[in-house]
């Protein structure tokens, strides 16, 4: 459609998350929560310096490092911070965390300092909020930081001894980070599946009423601000579904609904959105569609539905639909106005069909 109304559309409808770009990729809520990990690191180092037997090599340098890191943590929360993206902020936070832990470890006992154990926190942060490659980069940073702590203690150990120390100290961290990343990925996948199910009609797989209303509101707001072009709306109502249910049962009615839904999907582009708006009613959102294109799609929907047969008992049945088309901005300034106009024209189409069925010569 769009500029070419004859464009075929046989590909199934895209998920709402792709077609409407309603939410960014990633885990924003989880990321914001885990950004507090740096406060935990700061608190742990601060408390460790208060332990009586801990004697920092240079207290002033340690306190200066704590103060600088605290200022960095505060700056990272500032809305005017130069790095805006949440992913970039987390990467920067993890890098600063590794550097701070390294300095604190060097000043509180080197590789024997309990602060070394805090290296697990930036690894957990990376594993839960970034991809595998980014997490591997953070782990490589931890390895290099730990090597710098060992080098700072004196002569470099021989390669076999060094490898044993790295494996014994950091190996468990790598395993924990890997397991956390696998678990986090499974949780995110499950969450997306649940969200997808909540947005879909169980019978047809189309968007449900709640999800479509949210989509329409967002898309209309974008267009009312001039960010995008116009759009078309179609309201599609199945004719005589109640009579089919009464005569053959709800299983036949469900088969009719799924047949009509499939016919609608074949009539639209992958960028268009179809939803089940009620028991026997559907609504279609056609981005960038002109009034002429919307009318063309409406007729295509009627034709596709009429040509789609489905079995009821030993016979094949067909359904017909009444369709009303409206478009923004021609039919109103609010999305409710566009929807009302499409619904009114659908009712008019249904009435004309009733009159035609009652008096074939008049039709």
Image (spheres, rainbow, N blue to C red):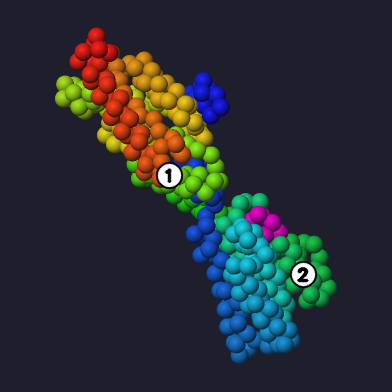
**Tag on residue 223?**
none
**Tag on residue 333?**
1
Crowd tier of the residue under label 2, counting other residues whose Cα lies within 10 Å: few below 14, some 14–19, many 20 or above: some
On the rendered image, what quadrant is the C terminus found in? top left
Residue 111 falls left or right of residue 131? right
Q: Measuring 59% from the left and 87% from the top, which residue is drawn there?
A: 51
Residue 339 on the magenta segment: no
Q: Residue furthest right?
A: 155
Residue 38 position, x and y percent, is: 59, 71
Dot 1: element:
loop
Tell me where the magenta segment starts and ends, as one range.
134-140
Q: Measuring 70% from the left and 83% from the top, which residue is drawn there?
A: 64
Residue with the mark numbered 2: 148
Residue 37 falls left or right of residue 100? left
Q: Quadrant of residue 360?
A: top left
Q: Quadrant of residue 111?
A: bottom right
Residue 184 position, x and y percent, is: 51, 54
Q: Measuring 56% from the left and 27% from the top, which residue is drawn there?
A: 3
Q: How many marks?
A: 2
Q: Nearer the viewer, residue 9 or 41?
A: 9
Label the magenta part by its dominant secondary structure: helix
Label 2 – label 1 distance at C-alpha: 64 Å
Q: Nearer the viewer, residue 332 or 123?
A: 332
């Amino acid at each position: 459609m769009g500029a070419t109304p004859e464009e075929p559309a046989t590909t199934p409808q895209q998920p709402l998350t792709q077609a409407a770009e309603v939410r960014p990729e990633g885990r924003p809520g989880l990321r914001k929560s885990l950004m507090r990990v740096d406060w935990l690191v700061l608190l742990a180092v601060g408390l460790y310096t208060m332990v009586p037997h801990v004697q920092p090599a240079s207290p002033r340098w340690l306190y200066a490092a704590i103060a600088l890191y605290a200022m960095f943590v505060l700056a990272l929360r500032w809305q005017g911070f130069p790095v805006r993206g949440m992913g970039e902020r987390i990467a920067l936070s993890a890098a600063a965390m590794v550097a701070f832990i390294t300095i604190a470890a060097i000043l509180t006992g080197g590789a024997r300092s309990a602060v070394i154990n805090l290296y697990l926190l930036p690894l957990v942060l990376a594993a839960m909020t970034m991809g595998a490659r980014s997490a591997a980069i953070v782990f490589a940073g931890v390895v290099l930081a730990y090597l710098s702590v060992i080098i700072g203690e004196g002569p470099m150990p021989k390669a076999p001894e060094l490898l044993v120390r790295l494996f014994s100290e950091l190996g468990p961290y790598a395993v924990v980070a890997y397991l956390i990343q696998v678990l986090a990925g499974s949780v995110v996948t499950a969450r997306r599946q649940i969200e997808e199910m909540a947005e879909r009609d169980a019978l047809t797989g189309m968007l449900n009423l709640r999800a479509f209303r949210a989509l329409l509101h967002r898309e209309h707001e974008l267009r009312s601000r001039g960010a995008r072009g116009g759009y078309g709306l179609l309201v599609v109502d199945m004719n005589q579904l109640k009579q089919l249910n009464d005569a053959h049962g709800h299983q036949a009615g469900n088969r009719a609904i799924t047949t009509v839904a499939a016919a609608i999907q074949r009539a639209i582009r992958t960028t268009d959105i179809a939803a089940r708006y009620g028991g026997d009613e559907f609504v279609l959102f056609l981005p960038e569609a002109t009034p002429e294109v919307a009318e063309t799609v409406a007729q295509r929907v009627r034709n596709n539905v009429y040509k789609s047969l489905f079995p009821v008992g030993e016979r094949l049945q067909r359904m017909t639909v009444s369709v009303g088309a409206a478009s923004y901005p021609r039919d109103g300034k609010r999305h409710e106005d566009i929807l009302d106009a499409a619904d009114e024209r659908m009712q008019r189409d249904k009435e004309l069909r009733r009159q035609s069925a009652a008096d074939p010569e008049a039709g």
